[in-house]
């Protein structure tokens, strides 16, 4: 059965792009990068205007040390040379080059410059290693969750994955789209747990889905294949998460040449149907089915929901990272209420606007991974 929601309105004007830095942060970063030059200039002025017993050594020494984590190796060396050169020129103008305190100041600033070069080298190597780790993680995501083609069997497709953990590329959410002899089949799921165990489970589910989507005649059969794959994977692992884990998932099927969609839900947030006029349907089943991996608690078959899919209608599948996103008052984001009455030029625009709305709702602080998959019959 389905539940309808109707609203009014249109797509709001796009806000700032997700991930774009506020202008204040850009200005602050630019100011920080000028600090080495400002320190040197301040040191020269201080040394020139104060008696000889006063020293600007801390300012000169700070210049290359500040440059070390911000500049390239060449920039750090230049900052050190600038600081040492400024000290020598200032002492020459003041006629104190050979005084003991002046020589000590030159040695101190020189040592600070050398230390800054060493710090820069260590920081750059760390950044290179981090970049390598990020590149590997990105390749892993593309291997496990490849971005689907923009058009599959005449359907417009868009997917988006947002990891809650900063600098993470993949977590426990999953999606996949597969064209098969039975139609275009889709899955969106959420694995219990985090870390590498969750990533391994994602790989198991996606791999089993691609095989089952080709071979099984029904969506219920695909779900059973996923169940068996998770059971086999759990017996091969010794961790508690693997033994007690489960995966919520929703599977959908759009047969070739038919304006319908079939859905099997295994304990997952229900899909949404957004019609061209803004009418929204929530595809809820008459009875609840257990998540994948919990067959030992019961074996009731998951009901199949069948709904019309007219031209221009968009099917949206999502994980609870969207529907359970909270604001500062603890209120959940309601994607159905937000989408009702809105129209979008395509699936990609829908996902972009929806993610931006969830991000604004939470103040930019996602607490859970989020996977979104949208398919439209053009």
Image (cartoon, helix red, strand yellow):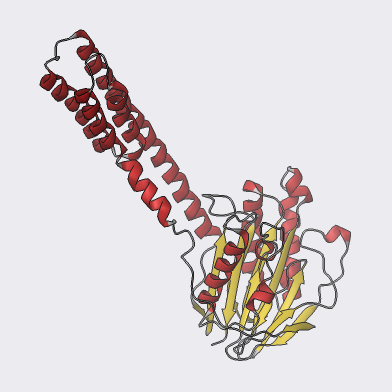
Q: Where, by quadrant of the figure, is residue 258 drawn?
A: bottom right
Where in the figure is residue 236, as x and y percent of width and height?
72, 47
Q: Is residue 365 above or below residue 147?
A: above
Quadrant of the image for the N terminus?
Answer: bottom right
Residue farthest top in this picture: 100
Foreground pick, 305 / 200: 305
Q: Is residue 368 left or right of residue 283?
A: left
Where in the figure is residue 117, as x and y percent of width and height?
30, 29
Q: Is residue 200 above or below residue 358?
A: above
Foreground pick, 104 / 44: 44
Residue at x 24% of width, y 21% of height: 110
Q: How many labels were placed on the picture?
A: 0
Q: Is residue 33 visible?
A: yes
Q: Is residue 95 left or right of residue 354?
A: left
Where in the figure is residue 238, as x and y percent of width and height?
74, 42
Q: Is residue 153 visible?
A: no
Q: Is residue 85 left or right of residue 325?
A: left
Residue at x 74% of width, y 51% of height: 234
Residue at x 64% of width, y 75% of height: 338
Where in the figure is residue 290, as x and y percent of width and height?
82, 65
Residue at x 63% of width, y 75% of height: 316
Foreground pick, 88 / 55: 55
Q: Is residue 286 above or below residue 358?
A: below
């Amino acid at each position: 059965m389905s539940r309808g929601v109707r609203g009014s309105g249109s797509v709001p004007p796009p806000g700032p792009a997700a991930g774009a830095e506020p202008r204040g942060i850009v200005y602050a970063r630019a100011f920080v990068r000028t600090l080495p030059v400002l320190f040197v200039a301040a040191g020269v002025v201080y040394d020139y205007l104060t008696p000889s017993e006063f020293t600007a050594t801390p300012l000169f020494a700070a210049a290359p040390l500040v440059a070390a984590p911000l500049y390239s190796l060449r920039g750090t060396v230049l900052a050190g040379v600038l600081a040492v050169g400024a000290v020598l020129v200032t002492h020459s103008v003041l006629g104190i080059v050979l005084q003991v305190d002046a020589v000590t100041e030159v040695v101190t600033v020189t040592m600070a410059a050398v230390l800054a070069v060493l710090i820069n080298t260590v920081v750059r190597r760390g950044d290179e290693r981090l970049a390598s780790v990020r590149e590997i993680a990105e390749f892993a995501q593309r291997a496990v969750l490849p971005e689907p083609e923009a058009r599959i069997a005449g359907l417009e497709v868009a997917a988006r994955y947002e990891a809650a953990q900063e600098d993470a590329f993949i977590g426990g959410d999953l999606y996949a789209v597969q064209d098969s002899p039975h139609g275009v089949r889709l899955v969106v799921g959420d694995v219990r747990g985090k870390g590498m165990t969750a990533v391994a489970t994602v790989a198991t589910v996606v791999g089993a889905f691609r095989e089952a989507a080709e071979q099984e005649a029904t969506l219920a059969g695909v779900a059973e294949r996923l169940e068996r794959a998770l059971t086999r994977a759990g017996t091969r692992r010794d961790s508690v998460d693997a033994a007690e884990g489960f995966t919520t998932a929703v599977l959908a099927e759009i047969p070739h040449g038919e304006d319908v969609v079939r859905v099997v839900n295994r304990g997952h947030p229900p899909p949404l149907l957004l019609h061209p006029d803004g009418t929204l349907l929530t595809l809820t089943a008459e009875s609840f089915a257990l998540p994948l991996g919990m067959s030992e608690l019961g074996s009731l078959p998951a009901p199949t929901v069948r709904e019309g899919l007219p031209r221009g209608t968009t099917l949206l599948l999502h994980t609870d990272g969207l529907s359970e996103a909270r604001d500062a008052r603890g209120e959940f984001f309601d994607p159905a209420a937000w989408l009702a009455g809105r129209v979008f030029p395509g699936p990609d625009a829908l996902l972009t606007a929806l993610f931006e709305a969830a991000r604004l709702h939470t103040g930019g602080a996602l607490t859970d991974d989020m996977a979104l998959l949208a398919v439209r019959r053009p």
